Amino acid sequence: MKEKGNFLKILRLFHCSEDGFSFLELMVVLTILGSLAGLATLGIVRFIGGATEEVRAVEEHQVQRGAVVYLASGNTISEPFTVTPSDQGVLDPYLMGNLKNSWVIDVDGNVTYAGSRGESGERRK
Protein backbone atom coordinates (compact mmCIF):
# COMPACT_ATOMS: atom_id res chain seq x y z
CA MET A 1 0.00 0.00 0.00
CA LYS A 2 2.99 2.24 0.57
CA GLU A 3 3.73 2.06 -3.16
CA LYS A 4 0.35 3.65 -3.92
CA GLY A 5 1.18 6.54 -1.60
CA ASN A 6 4.51 7.13 -3.35
CA PHE A 7 2.81 7.05 -6.72
CA LEU A 8 0.29 9.67 -5.63
CA LYS A 9 3.13 11.91 -4.38
CA ILE A 10 4.80 11.67 -7.79
CA LEU A 11 1.53 12.50 -9.53
CA ARG A 12 1.08 15.55 -7.31
CA LEU A 13 4.52 16.80 -8.35
CA PHE A 14 3.42 16.83 -11.99
CA HIS A 15 -0.10 18.12 -11.48
CA CYS A 16 -0.13 20.94 -8.94
CA SER A 17 -3.73 22.09 -9.24
CA GLU A 18 -7.08 21.14 -10.71
CA ASP A 19 -7.16 24.23 -12.94
CA GLY A 20 -5.05 22.85 -15.78
CA PHE A 21 -1.77 21.32 -16.76
CA SER A 22 1.48 22.22 -15.07
CA PHE A 23 4.30 23.85 -16.98
CA LEU A 24 6.35 20.65 -16.83
CA GLU A 25 3.53 18.59 -18.36
CA LEU A 26 3.15 21.07 -21.20
CA MET A 27 6.89 21.05 -21.87
CA VAL A 28 6.97 17.24 -22.01
CA VAL A 29 4.05 17.17 -24.47
CA LEU A 30 5.61 19.87 -26.66
CA THR A 31 8.94 18.04 -26.69
CA ILE A 32 7.27 14.81 -27.79
CA LEU A 33 5.24 16.58 -30.49
CA GLY A 34 8.33 18.40 -31.75
CA SER A 35 10.27 15.14 -31.99
CA LEU A 36 7.45 13.45 -33.90
CA ALA A 37 7.17 16.40 -36.29
CA GLY A 38 10.92 16.30 -36.93
CA LEU A 39 10.85 12.58 -37.68
CA ALA A 40 7.89 12.99 -40.03
CA THR A 41 9.64 15.83 -41.86
CA LEU A 42 12.78 13.75 -42.35
CA GLY A 43 10.72 10.87 -43.74
CA ILE A 44 8.90 13.13 -46.19
CA VAL A 45 12.15 14.75 -47.38
CA ARG A 46 13.72 11.32 -47.97
CA PHE A 47 10.63 10.17 -49.84
CA ILE A 48 10.65 13.22 -52.13
CA GLY A 49 14.41 12.93 -52.70
CA GLY A 50 14.06 9.27 -53.64
CA ALA A 51 11.21 10.05 -56.02
CA THR A 52 13.31 12.74 -57.74
CA GLU A 53 16.13 10.26 -58.34
CA GLU A 54 13.64 7.69 -59.63
CA VAL A 55 12.17 10.21 -62.10
CA ARG A 56 15.68 11.02 -63.31
CA ALA A 57 16.54 7.33 -63.83
CA VAL A 58 13.31 6.59 -65.73
CA GLU A 59 13.74 9.69 -67.86
CA GLU A 60 17.36 8.79 -68.63
CA HIS A 61 16.22 5.37 -69.81
CA GLN A 62 13.54 6.96 -72.01
CA VAL A 63 15.99 9.41 -73.62
CA GLN A 64 18.53 6.60 -74.14
CA ARG A 65 15.86 4.49 -75.83
CA GLY A 66 14.84 7.45 -78.01
CA ALA A 67 18.46 7.97 -79.08
CA VAL A 68 18.87 4.28 -79.94
CA VAL A 69 15.67 4.26 -82.01
CA TYR A 70 16.77 7.49 -83.74
CA LEU A 71 20.11 5.91 -84.69
CA ALA A 72 18.48 2.59 -85.66
CA SER A 73 16.19 4.48 -88.05
CA GLY A 74 19.22 5.28 -90.20
CA ASN A 75 19.91 8.72 -88.74
CA THR A 76 23.30 9.85 -87.48
CA ILE A 77 24.43 12.27 -84.80
CA SER A 78 27.28 14.42 -86.11
CA GLU A 79 27.93 16.31 -82.86
CA PRO A 80 26.67 16.10 -79.27
CA PHE A 81 23.44 17.95 -78.61
CA THR A 82 21.27 18.76 -75.61
CA VAL A 83 17.67 17.71 -75.17
CA THR A 84 15.78 20.01 -72.77
CA PRO A 85 12.21 20.07 -71.44
CA SER A 86 11.39 22.95 -73.78
CA ASP A 87 13.35 21.71 -76.83
CA GLN A 88 13.58 17.99 -77.51
CA GLY A 89 15.12 18.51 -80.95
CA VAL A 90 15.39 15.56 -83.33
CA LEU A 91 14.37 13.14 -80.56
CA ASP A 92 10.92 14.70 -80.20
CA PRO A 93 9.12 12.00 -82.27
CA TYR A 94 10.90 9.27 -80.28
CA LEU A 95 10.05 10.53 -76.77
CA MET A 96 6.75 10.14 -74.93
CA GLY A 97 5.55 12.88 -72.62
CA ASN A 98 7.45 15.90 -71.37
CA LEU A 99 10.95 15.84 -69.93
CA LYS A 100 11.74 17.25 -66.50
CA ASN A 101 15.54 17.36 -66.93
CA SER A 102 18.09 18.23 -69.60
CA TRP A 103 20.22 15.54 -71.24
CA VAL A 104 23.28 15.55 -73.52
CA ILE A 105 23.43 12.92 -76.27
CA ASP A 106 26.86 12.25 -77.79
CA VAL A 107 27.64 10.99 -81.31
CA ASP A 108 27.39 7.35 -80.17
CA GLY A 109 23.95 7.87 -78.62
CA ASN A 110 25.17 7.82 -75.01
CA VAL A 111 23.10 9.94 -72.64
CA THR A 112 24.51 12.15 -69.85
CA TYR A 113 22.52 14.13 -67.31
CA ALA A 114 22.94 17.87 -67.94
CA GLY A 115 20.82 19.19 -65.06
CA SER A 116 18.83 22.36 -64.98
CA ARG A 117 21.19 24.66 -63.04
CA GLY A 118 24.61 23.81 -64.39
CA GLU A 119 24.66 20.42 -62.69
CA SER A 120 26.26 17.56 -64.53
CA GLY A 121 26.28 13.85 -64.00
CA GLU A 122 28.37 10.90 -64.98
CA ARG A 123 27.33 8.69 -67.85
CA ARG A 124 25.49 5.57 -66.74
CA LYS A 125 25.83 2.30 -68.58
Image: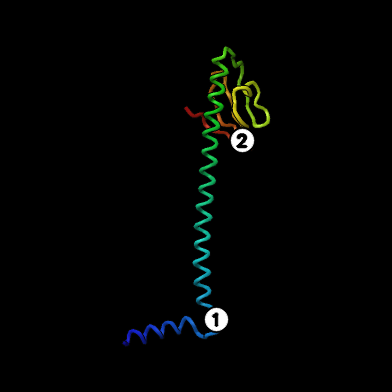
Measured as percent of width and height from the top left, residue 106 is found at 57, 22
On-image quarter of the N terminus: bottom left
Q: Which residue is label 2 attached to?
A: 100
Q: How is the image coloured?
A: rainbow
Identify the image quadrant of residue 5: bottom left
Element at badge 2?
Answer: loop
The image shows residue 20, relative to residue 69, as above or below, that is below
Instruction: From the top left corner, tell me how far across and down residue 80 is, in percent.
Output: 60, 21
Of all residues, the one furthest to the left in this rendering is: 1
> CA gap, disc 2 to disc 1?
54 Å
Decide which of 112, 45 is in the foreground and name it.
Answer: 45
Amino acid carrying label 1: it is Gly
- Mark found first going from the N terminus, 2 or 1: 1
| Residue 20 - label | 1
User: Residue drawn 51% across and 43% down?
Assistant: 50
Q: Is residue 53 left or right of residue 1?
A: right
Query: In the rendered structure, which amino acid carries the disc numbered 2?
Result: Lys
